[in-house]
Image (cartoon, rainbow, N blue to C red):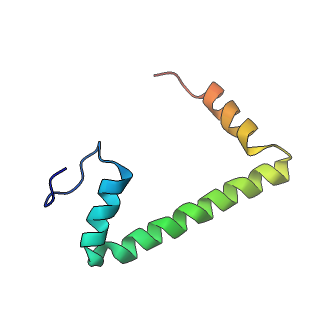
Amino acid sequence: MTSTGKPGPNATMRDALAYVARHPRLYPAVAALTVRHFCAKGRFYLLCWRAGYRVSTVRRLARENAPQT
């Protein structure tokens, strides 16, 4: 990645975070995405707990039943 360009599709997390660190106007959007991600993760864990399944079991079943491309 160049120091002035946006990170590409193959960028590492470090490259992406470095880009965000250099552009403070992106902070609110990144914070909102982070909160959204953790809320969704919490809902998923709660769904698994209420159904009586381990998270790893649900993920394995999802992988096994995913359509093959």
Vertical placement of 38 versus 26: above or below? above
Q: Is residue 51 left or right of residue 34?
A: right
Q: Please state if 58 lies on the left or on the right of 25 as rendered.
A: right
Q: Is residue 15 left or right of residue 31?
A: left
Q: Nearer the viewer, residue 14 or 60?
A: 14
Q: How many marks?
A: 0
Quarter-of-image position of residue 33:
bottom left
Q: Residue furthest right?
A: 52
Q: Residue at x 28, y 44 (%)?
A: 9
Q: Quadrant of residue 59?
A: top right
Q: Is residue 11 above or below residue 28?
A: above
Question: What is the residue that sits farthest to the top in this orientation?
Answer: 68
* Residue 22, image quadrant: bottom left
- Determine the residue positioned at 20% across, 57% down: 6
Residue pictured at 36% horizontal, 75% vertical: 27
* The C terminus lies in quadrant: top left
- Residue 7's x, y, as percent? 24, 53
Percent position (x, y) of residue 61?
Answer: 70, 31
Q: In this view of the protein, which residue sits in the foreground, 36 or 21? A: 21
Whole-percent x and y of residue 52? 86, 46
> Where's residue 30, x and y in %?
40, 69
